[in-house]
Amino acid sequence: MSYLNEVMLLGNLGENPVILKEEDNGKFVRLSIATSKKYKTPEGKVEQTNPEWHTVFLGNSQGKNAAAFLKKGDKVLVLGELKTHQWTDPTTEQTKTATAVYGREWRLIFSKKE
């Protein structure tokens, strides 16, 4: 049986890219992307859902370019896969779990004016 782990996000950056690590072949950055959807009520009024926030990690040249060109408010398209990781919080000794998108590629759709 085949498996598929593919994520496509189209949303706005909630903050400038955060550089987590710099290496010779690029940078490892974190993006925070908000997505929401619009819908029409039975009365015909257009409403928007509350934003859903997604953590996206980009590495190597993708991360380097994102750090150089993206900024808060930009609309971006990200393609990647979901990964879940666990760690132990050193202060509470509790096991924590987080799921994030590990981006393979991204495209700037619209740049917000300064």
Image (cartoon, rainbow, N blue to C red):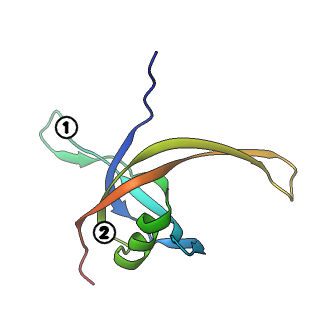
**SS of the residue under disc 2:** loop
- Would residue 15 appear left or right of 10 to someone viewing this image? right
Image quarter of residue 83: top right
In the picture, the disc for residue 74 is 2
**SS of the residue under disc 1:** loop
Residues marked 1 and 2 touching at CB (< 8 Å): no
Which is nearer the eye, 85 or 40? 85
Residue at x-position 35% and y-position 49%: 9
Residue corresponding to mark 1? 41
Which is nearer the eye, 42 or 114? 114
The amino acid type of the residue labelled 1 equals Thr
Residue at x-position 27% and y-position 84%: 114
The amino acid type of the residue labelled 2 equals Asp
Most extreme residue toward the bottom is 114
Pair 1/2: label in front:
2
Could you give the CA–CA distance between mark 1 and mark 2, rounded to whole angstroms?
28 Å
Q: Is residue 81 visible?
A: yes
Image quarter of residue 76: bottom left
**How many residues crowd mark 1 within 10 Å: few (<14), some (14–19), many (20+)?**
few
Residue at x-position 19% and y-position 37%: 41
In the picture, the disc for residue 4 is none
